[in-house]
Image (cartoon, rainbow, N blue to C red):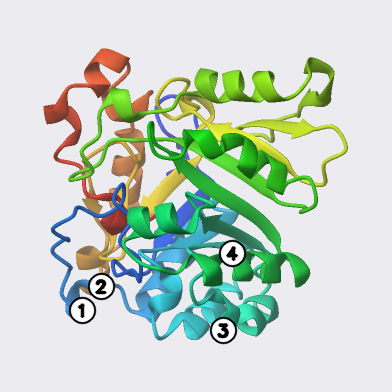
Amino acid sequence: MKNETPILQDLHGRHHGYLRISLIERCNLRCSYCMPEEGVQLSPKSHLMTYEEIYQIAKIFVKHGVTKIRLTGGEPLVRKDIPVILEKLATLPVELSITSNAVIIDRFIDVLKVNGVNKINLSLDSLNREKFKHITRRDQFDIVYKNMLLLVEEGFKVKVNVVLMKGFNENEIIDFINLTKNLPIVVRFIEFMPFDGNKWDMGKMVSYAEVMTYVNASFTEENIQRLQDAPNDTSKNYKISGYKGSFAVISSVTNPFCDSCNRLRLTANGQLKNCLFSSAESDLLTTLRLGNAIEPIIQKAVQAKFKVRGGMDTLKKLQEPKLHNNNRSMITIGG
């Protein structure tokens, strides 16, 4: 019998066992690197996946080898039927996690626990209240910080995502690392990436090498421990000796992790993206609503995945606006 290629395996031999599902394009913050200043054109509600459709599509991915599902947005907890979505997805044999800005997450502690969601990624780009207000265009720092502490207290595994931008928050790198002294969290520094409307350029980016320059200037070499990265990990992981938590750098721009990428993204309006950097999308929702099989579309999308960064395999290509300006703004892709 002829061996068929699994539908979640691309032409470079990478198997995709991790699906990120965006539940909603709306958010209760307005972070400048995520949402253009003028806002975005939101999909009509009828174009968004219902909770039944989210479950149907997720079930198909799980059937073909997905073992991890992360729910994102916008802010996924803004969606009114989030308890039902969690309850449905919790019936699947997957590790279920969520990304949130933590503004309202305190209202969902019990819902998350009962549905087995133990891993939470939080977005927090400054420990300075005024700078937080500037980058998010909202004055919510106190509640976000309080909720981060609450999640730790409640036993959740918390990762704090920090998008670094030159001239804005790179002087807080050590402050963030010092958070891990007494908190069992992972602080992850993320290189600023190009999306529609976020005015990206290389000059605004704080690189992996620059992060480590700050670290090496503040801690002795023997106290900086390089940790073993997990399989398919997006980050380079470190720990300061004696600290409860750890820190990491996600170097999507200067040192991409494409060789081991196992991620696919499903947007809130049912479009499959095979790479965060790619503007290409495959419409699963229309086909599903017509009652037709979506597996052929999934397979075609996966096999079309480029080896590196949506085809932008050099920094020169990444700096060419026409190669990434057709990509969605981050809020409509899902964090």
Q: Secondary structure at mark 1?
A: helix
As drawn, 50 above or below 214: below
Q: Does label 4 or label 1 sit earlier along the sequence?
A: 1
Work out how far the residue at label 4 is from the one at label 2, CA to CA, in angstroms.
31 Å
Determine whether the residue tagged by mark 3 lies in a helix, strand or loop: helix
Element class at badge 2: loop
Look at mark 1 in the image and give the residue it sits on: 45
State the count of labels: 4
**Taking the image as drawn, is residue 8 in sight?**
no
Check the image and report above or below for 56 versus 197.
Answer: below
Label of residue 145 in the image: 4
User: Few, some or many C-alpha atoms within 10 Å of disc 3 (few <14, some 14-19, many ≥20)?
Assistant: few
Where is residue 246 drawn, in percent x and y? 73, 40
The residue carrying mark 2 is 48
**Residue 107, which numbered label?**
3
List the single residue furthest toward the right. 242
Which numbered disc, 4 or 2, marks the residue closer to the eye? 4
Give me the C-alpha separation between circle 2 and circle 3: 24 Å
Q: CA distance from mark 1 to mark 2?
A: 5 Å
Q: Amino acid at mark 3?
A: Arg
Which residue sits at x=31%, y=65%? 268
Any part of residue 67 in sight? yes
